[in-house]
Every structure is written in C-alpha cells, then in structure tokens.
Image (cartoon, grey):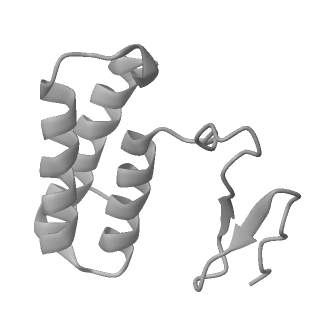
Amino acid sequence: MERPRKQPGETMTALDTPVESPRSDGSPPKYSRRLSDKILIAFHHACDQGDYEVAERLLHVLEFMLMRRPTPMEGNRRRTIESLVAAHERLWLLRHPEHQTE
C-alpha cells in the first residue's frame, strides 16, 4: 500500500494521512470533502472490518446531520440522502446475508 504524499502546507498525522495546516492569514483550512462524506467513508470502513455496531452509529450521526436545517455548505443534499439510503441497504445486507441474491 502506497503512503500518501505530503503536499505543501500539509502535515502528516500518526495515521500518515495528510491534514491541512491553518492558513497563514489565520483563516481555517479549506477541506476537500464534506463532513457527511467523511462519515460515509468511516461507515464503509467499519462495514469492511465487520464492525456493524459502529457502522450503525455512524449512520445515526449522518441522519442527525440531515435532519437539521440545510446549510449552504452542504452541497447536494439529494445525493447525500441517496448515499444514506444505499448505506442502510448495505448494512442490512451485511447483517442478513441469507437474503442476498446471486
């Protein structure tokens, strides 16, 4: 597995993942992914490792975020909802393998 490369203005964490440093003008760093996308990534990671309880809790966090009033930073809300539905389906199929079609 190839380690991510450090980009200018980034520092490496203990997990060897790049993290943007605060900007020189004091403004917060610009992130390349929405928080909801990161939660979905963590959900899929938990599923891949077979930790279904953590995966379910992450889905509840994502649902909580979607129930709040939308913010301009959210981007495509419909896509997020579709991803949430697909994630629920994946978790259900992982917990009920006898219902999978071949």
Q: Residue at x 44, y 21 (%)?
A: 73
Horizontal and vertical percent position of residue 31: 60, 42
> Which sits in the foreground, 1 or 11?
11
> Which sits in the foreground, 6 or 40?
6
Relative placement, left or right, of 24 versus 75 is: right
What is the quadrant of the N terminus in the image? Answer: bottom right
Q: Residue at x 12, y 49 (%)?
A: 60
Q: Residue at x 11, y 66 (%)?
A: 96
Residue 58 falls in image quadrant: bottom left
Q: Is residue 14 above or below residue 59?
A: below
> Which sits in the foreground, 39 or 8?
8
Residue lying farthest front?
25
Horizontal and vertical percent position of residue 99: 13, 60
Horizontal and vertical percent position of residue 26: 65, 41
What is the quadrant of the C terminus in the image? Answer: bottom left
Q: Residue at x 27, y 48 (%)?
A: 87
